[in-house]
Image: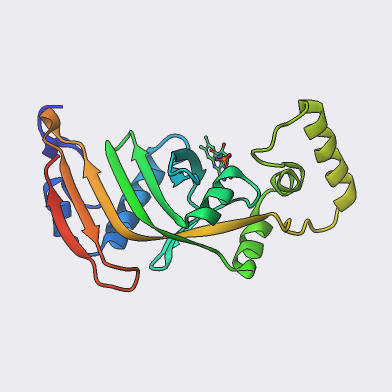
Amino acid sequence: MSDATAIEHPTGLTPGDFFAVDEPLRLFAAWFAEAKRSEPVNPEAMTLSTVDADGLPNARMVLLKGFDEHGFVFYTNLDSVKARELAGAAKAALTFYWKSLQRQVRLRGSVEPVVATEADAYFATRPRMAQIGAWASKQSAPMESRMAFEKAVARYAAKFGIGEVPRPPHWSGYRVKPVAIEFWQERPFRLHDRIVFTRSDASALWRKTRLYP
Ligand SMILES: Cc1cc2nc3c(=O)[nH]c(=O)nc-3n(C[C@H](O)[C@H](O)[C@H](O)COP(=O)(O)O)c2cc1C
């Protein structure tokens, strides 16, 4: 690629002028919409970073299931390693990388559980087998054999029959409430654009800063 302006930006924001946007959620929404159009697999995949009781970082992918001015939501098993780590330190970082757009977005902030009604509403939209899987999986616990897991799936499938599958008590969501959101756009010769929005807490106004790449 010889010229950064040659990159097509359906939002109308060229790499140079995405600095003009003052509201990080609006920029995130524009970039996410583009990623959904251009990323062949899982544009909503993001790395969730947490720390354990010794301060040792841990990271894994999860799926973004919603975002708004209140934060960025993902769902998981509440007995998992990540849930244990969040119980010890309710702070996290989220990282997106959309290869097709050569863009990275990073967020950091505190984490809070979503309310039960919100988790119920999302769980109800999941495919039935995924709902049954949520009952059968003891996420992050050692598994004696694949057969044991498949038996558990069959047991829960029989238990719920054709009725509605309720949300398991050990399955819910978390909301990351960002105090920093950084947008990174690749440009030729590693002269990338970086813009970070920061605020002192989740209710304060955003401050925008351009960073060296
Ligand atoms: C693309 C992708 C998306 C994933 N989405 C989720 C998710 O939304 N929720 C989840 O609990 N695990 C998800 N996983 C699995 C996690 O990366 C991880 O293996 C699992 O949650 C256990 O992590 P833990 O032991 O650190 O708690 C996903 C994995 C990949 C590769």
Name the side, left or right, on which 76 lies relative to 189. right
Residue beneath the point at 84% across and 45% down: 157
Rendered position, 72 above or below 185: below
Picture coordinates of residue 125, whole percent (x, y): 65, 56
Picture coordinates of residue 40, whole percent (x, y): 43, 34
Rendered position, 12 above or below 2: below
Q: Quadrant of ligand 1?
A: top right
Image quarter where the N terminus lies is top left
Can see residue 14?
yes
Residue beneath the point at 64% across and 69% down: 117
Image quarter where the C terminus lies is top left
Rendered position, 4 above or below 30: above
Residue beneath the point at 76% across and 27% down: 146
Q: How is the image coloured?
A: rainbow
Name the side, left or right, on which 157 lies relative to 198. right
Can see residue 9?
no
Name the side, left or right, on which 174 lies relative to 167. left
Rendered position, 133 above or below 203: above
Name the side, left or right, on which 127 lies relative to 106. right
The front one of 191 and 30 is 191
Picture coordinates of residue 112, whole percent (x, y): 50, 63
Residue farthest toward the front in the current orientation of the protein? 54
Count of numbered labels shown in the rendering: 0
